Amino acid sequence: MTAQPAQRPRLLQAMVDAFRQEDVRKKLVFTLTMLVIFRFVAHVPIPNVDRNALKQAFEGNALLDFLSIFSGGALQNLSVAALGVYPYITASIVIQILTPLIPSWRALSEEGEQGRRRLQVITHWISVPMAFVQGYGQIVFINSQSGGAVVQNFGILDHPMGTLATLLTLTAGTMFLVWLGELITENGIGNGVSVIIFGGIVARLPSLVPNVTTQSILATAGFVGFAIGLIYLVVYFQEATRKVPVQYARSAFRGGRMYRQQGQSHVPLRVNMAGMIPLIFAYSIMILPPIVASYFTSTGGWVGSVASFFVNQFQSGRGSGGTGWYWLILFIMVVAFTFFYTMVQYQQQQIAKNLQRQGAFIPGIRPGAPTEAYLVRVVTRITWAGAFFLGFVAILPFFVGLLTDVRALTISATGFLIVVAVVLDTMKQLEAQLLMRNYEGFIR
């Protein structure tokens, strides 16, 4: 009786199988190479930056710390990639919202791959002014948070050429990252833009470890428990679907006669159809009040008092132990944006029309308007679960700060959501690559 060789764990074996395949190995290496280039770019500073003033601006400023985490530290270095890919994401959100409202864009979305490429070009053009506006706002805010000007020769009226050069540099950095992301999508593994965001967040995680380990053992253990539980919840809700049964009427020839047969399938409706977009919407709006109010805190009188109130209530809310009002408003906004964006996504899919075109129907529901009304009711019901989950993810740092006293940790649960979502998507794509070659993948 011969001894059987010990089998490797499933995940390890899948990684070995992936690297054995030359084309899959090339995709993985290409993706890692693009991430390395991104990290190099994140450390290339823009001109005319006062490093001491920049350090002073970030000391104790939870809002800037939060923004820097999602840029992979590029904002804290004020590099050419300080804006990350978020102007492009904002432009993509605008395109998705306006496509059903603009007839020409709606026609492009229905033209297949060629139409989607033209919409992609429009998204790139909209990203440029978005980057200009966001870059100008961030530099003005950073300058206001230090004793002196962080970026020298900056100001539309006083230094127009220096301001233009700085904004062009930031915009070029953003578009370069978008280009890297599209290269990853075409030649690598995973959605390129999401992988770039993932790389930026993960790059900052090691610097946050001392903030946790310097706490008490009980607080550190509590935080680790929260993190593990959150990862489980994110995976559960990201993969949760409501399967609506569907029947297809098929025709087949047998013995010279045509017979109609019934085929069964289902339409998967995701519980979290909106993804992370509602969180980005809500955070973007919640960031705006302290930025605007910071310009009026030194004016005095009731204007200065109101401005100081907004700065204290909204900006301090970014830390783990922020005000309850901040987190309550954030929770409500996330839930509202989840319903809004889910309905936008659902309307673009046109599920009821597609079923009717394919000769499919939901048992007990008539095709056409009744099917549309039924699907809207189902989507609305399951979206409550997704909306409350995203709202919980948004306010989780508040409860972590109360229960574990880990107040120095500035990364929010949104970062966990993005990281886990990108990992799941990348694993699915790698799984598909392995299954195409008759290998066993990661996912059971």
Image (cartoon, rainbow, N blue to C red):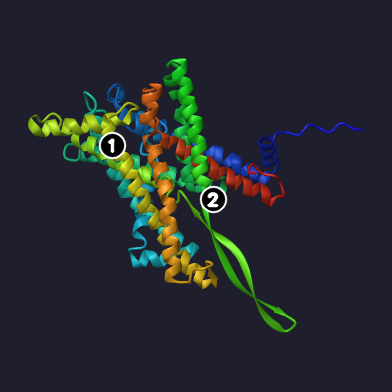
**As displayed, is residue 280 above or below residue 363?**
above
Q: Amino acid at mark 1?
A: Gln
Instruction: Find numbered disc 1 in the image and state the secondary structure of the residue it sits on.
Output: helix
Q: Quadrant of residue 166?
A: top left
Image x and y of residue 58, in percent = 31, 25
Name the residue carrying label 1: 138
Distance of label 2 from label 1 (alpha carbons): 32 Å
User: Label 2: how many residues lie within 10 Å, few (<14), some (14-19) or many (20+)?
Assistant: few
Quarter of the figure that contains the C terminus: top right
| Mark 1 Cα-neighbour bin, 10 Å: few <14, some 14–19, many ≥20 | some
Mark 2 highlights which residue? Answer: 186
Q: Quadrant of the N terminus?
A: top right
Residue 326 lies, in percent from the top left, at 28, 35
The earlier-in-sequence mark between 2 and 1 is: 1
Residue 401 appears at what percent x and percent y?
A: 37, 25
Q: In front: 370, or 271?
A: 370
Q: Nearer the viewer, residue 183 or 422?
A: 422
Most extreme residue toward the bottom is 256
Residue at horizontal 84%, vertical 33%?
Answer: 4
Q: Which of these two is toward me, 380 or 251?
A: 380
Looking at the picture, tell me which residue is in the foreground, 329 or 287.
329
The amino acid sitting under disc 2 is Glu
Residue sitting at 48 percent across and 71 percent down? 366
Residue most extreme to the left: 301
The structure residue drawn at horizontal position 36% and vertical position 25%, both measured from the top left corner, is: 402
Image location (x, y in percent) of residue 387:
39, 46
223 left or right, relative to 20: left
